[in-house]
Image (spheres, rainbow, N blue to C red):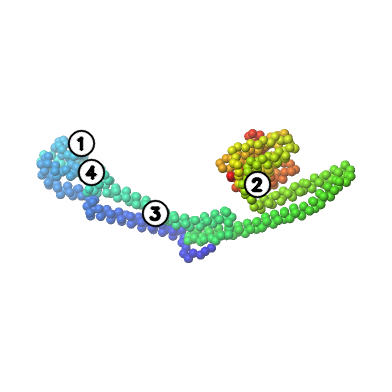
């Protein structure tokens, strides 16, 4: 792993975040207070006691003013009462004016919204109402904006949220960058790409995890290499064994066939036929082992454009010949298929024929077998349905596994548990998949081979 000179732990990163957040919040409060003070100094904002001082400075003038002379009062909210509490004039709603008089009678000098400046004059009582919070000097701002304190609070909340988002994004991006190193390592391990350099993080805790992952990677790499060597050795041994056995089997078959040309009695002929039949079975076993070896090695496919109609025709011809012994009714169903597909013809045909041969083997005499081809969502599906007993739940999950024999009632001497396994591997090499179920039409087994067009 690469070495990094400076590393920090998560505790220090968290402390940095808290420190930056605290400094940012203090700076934000200081900025808003300075902004508010500038507003007061430039008289854009009137201080909370502005109207109270203004009214007190004009109290004598208001007391001396004649009734009906409201020039001095028009800049305020006011109401005039006679000594019995009857409203004479004012610019306050009558209902609220009545509430003000009731409050005054109870020796209250304000309510939750306004404070009262009460002035007794010769013929009436004048009450000027005012607020004890900051206001805008400009009437337009005063009318359409909340009071400065509320605006300041709203601005603080917005800037505070912006600060939280900015710091969270900044520190989150920094942590995400370090976590990305972990993700790259785990992704590589998941894809079994184990020969790669590991970048070191600036966070101590992340490096501790990385060190554990590197150890796991190295051990997994060693394990996979050993397993790969064992698998390669096993395949080579199987191939060598099959090749070595082929020579004595050929000699045995040749001698048995020569004996058939001699004048043998019935018992001798019968025993010789047993020999030839056993040779056939042994050759079939060897062929199965070689097929598995080739399938596991992942032979190089030769993709080319295939005439799908001609491809289907050839499969149907071969299937019809194979189905003669059981006199099966072979049904072809084709629906909305393309003229051509891009695939490896030999392996695709082998996969389909493996499925069809299984279906023929498990079908009853004079039964039905459906081979249908359709296109769904950009994929060609080759579907084989037989009229046998169908799959059990266990077989649906395991029938494509290597050497799986399943229920004995679905087995025969010629069944080695590799047909569907090979079909699955060949189809997957085409980027497709295999699906097992039971047929709703024939009530037997149903196998779907699906490949992309």
The residue at which mark 2 appears reads as 345
Total numbered badges shown on the rendered structure:
4
Separation (CA) of disc 4 from disc 3: 41 Å
Q: Do labels 3 and 2 touch, CB within 8 Å? A: no
User: Which residue occupies the foreground of this view, 80 or 303?
Assistant: 303
User: Which residue occupies the foreground of this view, 384 or 9?
Assistant: 384
- Residue 378 x/y as whole percent: 56, 42
Q: Quadrant of residue 20?
A: bottom left
**From where the camera sits, is residue 423 visible?**
no
Asked which secondary structure carries label 2, the reply is helix
Separation (CA) of disc 2 from disc 1: 97 Å
Taking the image as shown, residue 275 lies to the left or right of residue 332, namely right
Q: Do labels 4 and 1 touch, CB within 8 Å? A: no
The residue at which mark 4 appears reads as 114
Taking the image as shown, residue 41 lies to the left or right of residue 343, namely left
**From where the camera sits, is residue 402 visible?**
yes
- Callout 1: few (<14), some (14-19), or many (20+) C-alpha neighbours within 10 Å? few
Decide which of tag 3 and tag 1 comes sooner along the chain. Answer: 1
Question: In the rendering, which numbered label is found on residue 63?
Answer: none
Quadrant in the picture for the C terminus = top right
The residue at which mark 1 appears reads as 94
Q: Do labels 4 and 3 touch, CB within 8 Å? A: no
């Amino acid at each position: 792993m690469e070495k990094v000179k400076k590393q920090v732990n998560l505790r220090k990163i968290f402390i940095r975040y808290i420190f930056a957040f605290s400094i940012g919040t203090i700076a934000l409060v200081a900025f808003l207070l300075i902004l508010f003070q500038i507003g007061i100094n430039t008289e854009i904002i009137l201080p909370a006691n502005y109207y109270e001082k203004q009214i007190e400075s004009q109290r004598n003038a208001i007391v001396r003013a004649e009734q009906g002379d409201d020039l001095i009062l028009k800049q305020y909210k006011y109401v005039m009462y006679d000594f019995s509490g009857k409203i004479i004039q004012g610019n306050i709603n009558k209902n609220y004016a009545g509430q003000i008089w009731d409050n005054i009678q109870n020796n209250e000098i304000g309510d939750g919204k306004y404070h009262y400046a009460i002035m007794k004059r010769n013929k009436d009582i004048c009450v000027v109402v005012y607020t004890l919070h900051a206001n805008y000097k400009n009437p337009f701002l005063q009318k359409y904006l909340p009071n400065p304190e509320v605006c300041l609070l709203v601005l603080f909340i917005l800037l505070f949220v912006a600060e939280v988002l900015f710091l969270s994004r900044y520190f989150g991006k920094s942590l995400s960058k370090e976590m990305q190193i972990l993700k790259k390592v785990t992704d590589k391990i998941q894809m079994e790409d184990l020969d790669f350099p590991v970048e070191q993080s600036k966070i101590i805790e992340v490096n501790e995890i990385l060190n554990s992952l590197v150890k796991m990677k190295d051990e997994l790499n060693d394990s996979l290499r050993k397993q790969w060597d064992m698998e390669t050795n096993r395949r080579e041994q199987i191939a060598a064994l099959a090749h070595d056995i082929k020579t004595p089997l050929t000699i045995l078959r040749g001698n048995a066939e020569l004996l058939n040309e001699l004048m043998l009695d019935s018992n001798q002929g019968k025993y010789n036929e047993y020999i030839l039949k056993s040779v056939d079975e042994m050759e079939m076993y060897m062929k199965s082992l070689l097929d598995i070896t080739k399938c596991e090695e992942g032979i190089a496919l030769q993709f080319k454009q295939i005439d799908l109609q001609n491809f289907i025709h050839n499969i149907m011809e071969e299937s019809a010949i194979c189905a003669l012994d059981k006199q099966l009714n072979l049904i072809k169903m084709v629906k909305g298929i393309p003229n051509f597909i891009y695939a490896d013809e030999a392996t695709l045909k082998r996969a389909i024929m493996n499925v069809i041969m299984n279906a023929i083997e498990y079908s009853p005499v004079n039964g039905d077998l459906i081979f249908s081809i359709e296109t769904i969502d950009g994929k060609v599906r080759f579907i084989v349905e037989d009229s046998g007993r169908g799959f059990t739940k266990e077989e649906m999950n395991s029938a494509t596994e290597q050497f799986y024999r399943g229920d004995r009632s679905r087995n025969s001497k010629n069944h080695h548990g590799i047909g569907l396994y090979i079909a699955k591997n060949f189809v997957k090499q085409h980027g497709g998949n295999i699906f097992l179920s039971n047929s709703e039409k024939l009530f037997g087994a149903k196998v779907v081979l699906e490949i992309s067009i």
